[in-house]
Image (tube, rainbow, N blue to C red):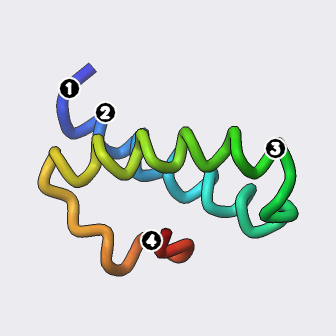
Amino acid sequence: MTEGEMLKLSVEEFSRVQDYMVTCEKDSETYRRIKRRYIELKVILTASGINLTELDIIKE
């Protein structure tokens, strides 16, 4: 898998994770687990030089 393909998959997963977060109650266990993956993806994408300004709808 190329770096470009990996970044594409990470951006797509970041978007999906945010969709799940929007539908969950913020005080639920599900939200806390999804948020952990959200943070991981945010770190990966930021370290890869991806500007999350437009992509990040959660802003946490």
- Identify the residue under disc 3: 30
Alpha-carbon neighbours of circle 3 within 10 Å: few (<14), some, or many (≥20)?
Answer: few
Q: Could you tell me how far apart the alpha carbons at marks 4 and 3 are, in whole angstroms?
A: 19 Å
- Identify the residue under disc 4: 56
Q: Which quadrant of the figure has residue 55?
A: bottom left
- Identify the residue under disc 2: 6
Q: Nearer the viewer, mark 3 or mark 2?
A: 3
SS of the residue under disc 1 = loop
- Against 1, residue 25 (above or below) is below
Q: Could you tell me how far apart the alpha carbons at marks 2 and 1 are, in whole angstroms?
A: 6 Å
Alpha-carbon neighbours of circle 1 within 10 Å: few (<14), some, or many (≥20)?
Answer: few
Q: Earlier in the sequence, mark 4 or mark 2?
A: 2
Q: Which mark is residue 2?
A: 1
- Name which residue type carries label 4: Asp
SS of the residue under disc 3 = helix
Q: Could you tell me how far apart the alpha carbons at marks 4 and 2 are, in whole angstroms?
A: 18 Å
Q: Which mark is residue 47?
A: none
